[in-house]
Amino acid sequence: MERVTNVSELRDVQPTDWAYEALRQLIEKYGCIAGYADGTFRGNRTLNRYEFADGLNTCLQQIEKLIAAGVNNIAREDLEKLSQLSNEFSTELGNIRGRINRLEERTTFLENHQFSTTTKLNGLVWFNLTGATAGRNVRYEAAGELPGLIRVAGRGADGRPIVQRADDPNITFSVLTWLTFNTSFTGKDSLVIQLAAGNGISPANQFASAGLLNTFGSPFFDQTAGTNNGSADVIVREIFYQFPITKGLQMVIGPRINWHRFFDYNPFTFIFTGANSFNSQGTTVYDPIDRGSGAVVLWNINKQFELHVGYLGENNEYLPSEFGFNTASDPKKGLFNGTNVMTTELTYKPSSRANIRLTYSYINLDNNGGVVSGEPIYGVADDGQGGSIEPASAHAFGVNFDWLITPSIGIFGRYGYATTKIDPVNPVPGGNINSQAFQLGLGFPNLGKKGALGTLSFLVPFDVLKGREFLVAGGGNGGTQYEIEATYFYPLTDNIALVPAFFLIGNANNFDDNPTIYVGNLRAQFSF
């Protein structure tokens, strides 16, 4: 806004009107109206009379302030002009002042009832209706089961992994809620605390081998927020502080950082709008912890290149600490001696429609109970004979790309390769588990409606290339599991969306003779 010192600049008012001339004199004498730099006066556009009355109201307020301040050179004839103008525009002035009063009342209410002057609250709620079927029993590897379908692996007397069969689960209806508090102290920093509560145990988990909970066929939002017990306990899902170091360089530190916030992003598998099963929404190779304690550095090198580097020690909301997990906060293991990951990711943007991300992770997997589990191992590993192994280390490499070919169609994909060293405690031969994973899909932005997104994805989450003998769960009989997913995000309003999804899983648990599993999910998504 720029101050107008000549009413002739206000092109929306006719200069032949008496009111125009009277207001012109008041403006030039007392400098009391603001206008826009393009030379027009823009008030309430209900009527030009309202626009003029808005300016008159401003002049009245300015002269009232001068009188209150003891200024005694207000001419009587000017006061008479104001009185006559006020009478002529009394209706419009009354409406304007009524609106101002209501606005002031509303502002006062918000100031008295706002959550915080520095903190913003955002919420997300998901309802999930999910069903899964295979038509006949599905083979899975497990020796026992804890509450919440948490399965443990084991070998039989013959040294082979114990195999069981699962019947079809029942249809479930669950809820998940995230409340995110974002606090800024300087306007450039951000302290994020995310609380979560949910009660979902997705039906496809009934088919999964030990170590594969919440993987294939499980919609991401069909989960218990904390440990997988189906109880809607409120937990802290994320807590971290992000702040700038220099221009283009930021630091993130915290006791529970979400790895997926800063690595392996893809717009077509973004969980809120894109492909969203646990396996399709992100890598299955180089993220063993999901959330952890540590730090991430974000460097925006230039318009085409971006580098992220992070170190996180395991500190997860869904892993039970009493069973030896969450080693970063356990003084017996600590930040550096338990399960942890160091990740480096370079993003190249050849154009505004395409991105290529190259990722490397060095991973340490703790030997919880003498076995190891977690990416890049999709399952559970021992020494191949039922004995314990030392903590394992792994090198994992990956590429992730997306390309919006036209405004209405895009392609996306991932490829990952990993090698994990197996070091037995007993004097038996060790070795490596080498594995790969890949995904290829199509995305259809604005399909049927602006803001909608359809996705079709094919992926192989865990293809064992070498070392299957070390897998006490996840190796199957040498088959290769594959998954097909179709998802359609349809926004009903800015804050409500429906998301139907369909999943097909072949050769589940890497058994090539397992029946095909079909999963259907309907999600209602609410944001506020």
Image (spheres, grey):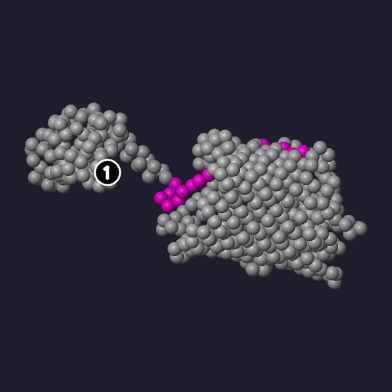
Instruction: State the extent of the magenta-drawn residues as a range.
Output: 115-133
| Left or right of 433 in this view: 302 | left
For residue 87, above or below residue 509: above
| In magenta segment, residue 125 | yes
What secondary structure is the stretch in magenta mostly built from?
strand
Viewer-proximal residue, 84 or 17? 17
The answer to whether residue 255 is left or right of residue 482 is left
Closer to us: 237 or 433: 433
Tell which residue pokes out farthest to the right in this image.
158
Q: Is residue 237 visible?
A: no
* Mark 1: few/some/many CA within 10 Å (<14, 14-19, 20+): few
Q: Nearer the viewer, residue 103 or 133?
A: 133
Task: Measuring from the top left, give residue 132's x and y in whole percent.
Answer: 74, 39
Which residue is located at x 54 percent, y 56 percent? 350
Residue at the spot 78% in from the left edge and 69% down from the top edge: 423
Relative to 115, 391 lies left or right: right
Residue 284 falls in image quadrant: bottom right
Residue 124 sits inside the magenta stretch: yes
The tally of labels here is: 1
Instruction: Provide the secondary structure element on which disc 1 rests.
Output: loop
At horizontal 67% and vertical 45% (from top left) the residue drawn is: 457
Measuring from the top left, give residue 483's x and y in whole percent: 73, 46
Residue 23 falls in image quadrant? top left
The residue at which mark 1 appears reads as 38
